[in-house]
Amino acid sequence: MFDSLSSKLSGVFSGLSRRGRLSEGDVAEAMREVRMAMLEADVALPVVRDFVDKVRERAVGQEILESISPGQAVAKIVNDALIEALGGAGAATLNLSAAPPVAILMVGLQGSGKTTTTGKLGLRLSSRERKRVLLASLDVQRPAAQLQLQQLAERVGVTSLPILPGQSPQEITRRAMKTARQEGYDIVVLDTAGRLSIDEALMQEVREIREIAGPAETLLVVDAMTGQDAVNTAQHFNEAVGVTGVVMSRMDGDARGGAALSMKAMTGAPIKFVGMGEKPEALEEFYPERVAGRILGLGDIAGLVEKASETLDQEESERVAKKMLAGKFDLDDYASQIRQIGKLGSVSNILGMLPGAGKLKEKLGDRDLDTAIFKRHQAIISSMTKAERKTPAIIKASRKKRIAAGSGTTVQEINKMLKQFDDMSTMMKRLNKMGLAGMKQMLSGMMSGKGNPNMPGGFGGLPRR
């Protein structure tokens, strides 16, 4: 989402870093570039003005102008200003401290992803916060809206309020709160109806529901793909009914990102969650410092580690790692690693969380960085017998034809995968023979740009391509 803005800001800082000490003119020119980059990214004009003024004021101080590395100093100022614009360091948490049942009111326009987000939030609260959650659809306008939420609730393993035809949203709210009190639920998530545009009837309905439920949180769901329209929607809802937090859906899309940068400044309501995909678990807390880091090419290592710890099977990873180091890595283990990678999402997404990976992504251009090749490899391995997976050496021409037919691939693709696997196995065995001291020596040689002349093969003991 922020690739274009990130690329332009990186260009600005690269230019500054080549100039030695800065003059006020250098800072002014850089700020013009920053201003244009942010406007092109669809950031609201008042937010751009405020942002640029803050950065300029801090950057023209004597400390920065006489700094040894002024480019880095200005990048640090921009980073701090971005974090501030996005709502300040740290995630804005939900207020769940009220006496149960705590009501959370979900509001937004039709098509913003409100019902899907309600299901995701229900899963998050039940699995991470260990709360008993009741979901209730108050949408009697859209056909099958209540049924959609019921199906989502079943999918994520939380309870939904039984559907009673003919009830008004206000009556459903009273029934939901009464059911939650009687049956000991901790949280009630109320999914209100949306409209194609903001109107007084919608706002009045939300006000009445709010009066009945007394929600601790009123979360506005906005579609990040709608750009500044998302900010306008947030302003209208905030003025009419009061919003305590924003959830931005479709943050994994290719919008220009300006809505996220504008939201806190224009509404006063922090972004609390972002939707990062269609899967029920694809709802993440919003950390301004991590987003700022990704925009400036600093990566998001904390986010990557958190994602890995949540999605990867630690025991399985350790088991495979031990087999790899012992030189006993087989195709079953390779398939296991492919499944682990798949859980992390696309390679593009992982690259975006690594420091300095922005330039690598630029060089790769529009090339497919997703995991399609891994899926093909998984299909090939699934079409093999147990013996073939354990001992790939037995896979000859007739077996390859059978595997190709079963996996929907070609013999050439199978040959290529087996060659890659063979290279990997050879390297694992070589590392095992080298031991810890040898690996340190090899890594030291790689870091210094020298190979190890005592090692067979190419650079640093690794086979040449």
Image (spheres, helix red, strand yellow):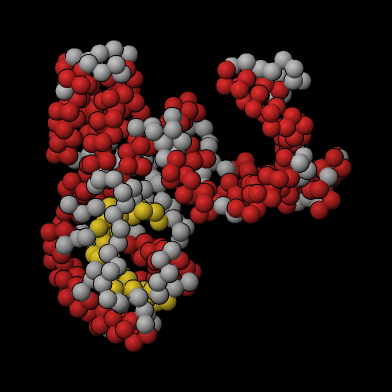
Residue situated in front as seen by the camera: 33 or 407: 33
For the view shown, which residue lies furthest in the front direction?
437
Q: Is residue 425 above or below residue 99?
A: above
Note whether residue 38 is visible.
yes
Front one among 383 and 354: 354
Q: Residue at x 27, y 41 (%)?
A: 83
Horizontal and vertical percent position of residue 232: 18, 51
Q: Which of 384/426 is in front?
A: 426
Quadrant position of the C terminus in the picture: top right
Q: Quadrant of residue 443?
A: top right
- Point 58% across, 46% down: residue: 341
Position of residue 124 relative to residue 449, above or below, is below
Q: How many labels were placed on the picture?
A: 0
Which residue is painted at 52% across and 49% down in the image?
308
* Residue at x 43% of width, y 29% of height: 356
Left or right? Give the position of 403 relative to 210: right
Q: Position of residue 312 (x, y in %)?
A: 56, 52
Q: Residue furthest bottom?
A: 182
One can see residue 192 in this view: no
Q: Nearer the viewer, residue 20 or 295?
A: 20
Q: How far across and how far down the image is residue 429, in percent? A: 77, 34
Above or below 145: residue 257? above
Which quadrant would the N terminus be assigned to in this image? top left
355 horizontally vs 323: left or right: left
Residue 207 falls in image quadrant: bottom left
Q: Quadrant of residue 292?
A: top left
- Asked if residue 455 lies left or right of residue 26, the reply is right
State the image coordinates of residue 446 (x, y, percent, origin top left).
61, 21
